[in-house]
């Protein structure tokens, strides 16, 4: 078991150099939540209603803002207000994947102005180091954090082996801005304390027919030593009450974490 995986989120927050990571780790312990919900809905009001319901159970809201058909600036204001009301951070899962100059514009400008409201965003490393440098020019002065996609949850993903290894090295090099990874497990032997977030989490089903692969919170947090579970349809897609489902995942994630740190 890695040393960091045995520490509490607060112990890690106390010494963490990255402001966003520090804030996130603190509120995880405060809310007893390592749950991020992926709200992949396409109407502004559906998104806002769901976020208000599940807000008390999450540490991090994950958005795909470009799937919202009636997006406007008011939606962002309301999301930020909900984040303050329920105490969670916002992660726009933009998965940038272009050259540094282009991602700078995509991150700061356009319809969504992601850098102005999202605490955290993420990128693929396929373009090389320039993508991180470009995003950092925009995000670091604003106190934002970046996650690198080191692995993916989907069947047949090409993000494995030397690609994953090179991604870890880029994160260490830019550890002032890179605060963590999207990954299936904690990577051993890292020098910095990166927050590992894992999508592809479900308690009831094993996949979705389009390549998604689900594992349980116990497998992800306790066995694979990741820090945060990302759950989408498991929370809002079953037809059951979303607030209750979010609580079910929060409890499962939290209990798995407690088992891990008491090992
Ligand atoms: P769901 O739990 O409904 O399968 O949703 C998973 C969410 O996590 C989606 O928003 C998807 O874009 C995201 N995701 C993923 O499933 N696998 C990855 O490797 C990376 C992701 O961001």
Image (cartoon, grey):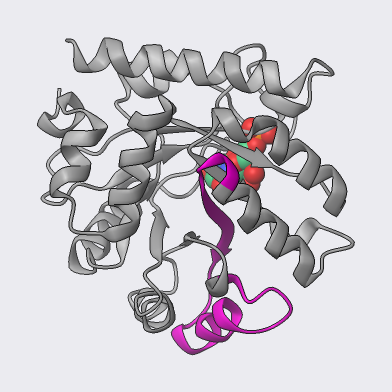
Identify the residue at image location x=26%, y=55%: 168
Q: How many marks?
A: 0
Residue 114, x across and y down, in percent: 59, 71
Identify the residue at image location x=49%, y=14%: 251
Q: Is residue 83 magenta?
A: no
Q: Which residues are magenta?
A: 85-114
Residue 109, x across and y down, in percent: 63, 84
Screen quadrant of the C terminus: top left
Q: Going by the image, does 124 lie left or right of 82? A: left
Q: Going by the image, does 166 lie left or right of 115? A: left
> Quadrant location of residue 64?
bottom right
**Where in the image, quadrant-wise, is ligand 1 located?**
top right
Q: Is residue 106 magenta?
A: yes
Residue 164, x across and y down, in percent: 33, 51
Identify the residue at image location x=47%, y=60%: 119
Q: Is residue 110 visible?
A: yes
């Amino acid at each position: 078991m890695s040393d960091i995986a045995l520490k509490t989120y607060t112990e890690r927050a106390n010494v963490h150099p990255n402001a966003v990571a520090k804030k996130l780790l603190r509120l995880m312990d405060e809310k007893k939540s390592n749950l991020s919900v992926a709200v992949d809905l396409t109407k502004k009001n559906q998104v806002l209603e769901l976020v208000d319901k599940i807000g008390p159970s999450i540490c991090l809201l994950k958005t795909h803002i470009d799937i919202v058909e009636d997006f406007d600036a008011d939606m962002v204001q309301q999301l930020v207000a909900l984040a303050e009301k329920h105490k969670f951070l916002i992660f726009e899962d933009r998965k940038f994947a272009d050259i540094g100059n282009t991602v700078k514009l995509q991150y700061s400008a356009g319809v969504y102005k992601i850098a102005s409201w999202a605490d955290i965003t993420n990128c693929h490393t396929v373009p090389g180091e320039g993508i991180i440098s470009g995003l950092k020019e925009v995000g670091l002065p604003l106190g934002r954090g970046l996650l690198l996609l080191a692995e993916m949850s989907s069947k047949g993903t090409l993000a494995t082996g030397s690609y994953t290894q090179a991604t870890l090295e880029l994160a260490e090099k830019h550890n002032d801005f890179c605060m963590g990874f999207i990954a299936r497990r904690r990577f051993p032997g890292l020098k910095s304390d990166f927050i590992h977030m894992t999508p592809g989490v479900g308690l009831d089903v094993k996949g979705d027919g389009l390549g998604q692969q689900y594992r349980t919170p116990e497998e992800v947090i306790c066995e694979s030593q990741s820090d945060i579970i990302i759950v989408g349809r498991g929370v809002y897609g079953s037809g059951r009450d979303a607030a209750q489902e979010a609580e079910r995942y929060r409890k499962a994630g939290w209990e798995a974490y407690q088992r891990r740190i008491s090992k």
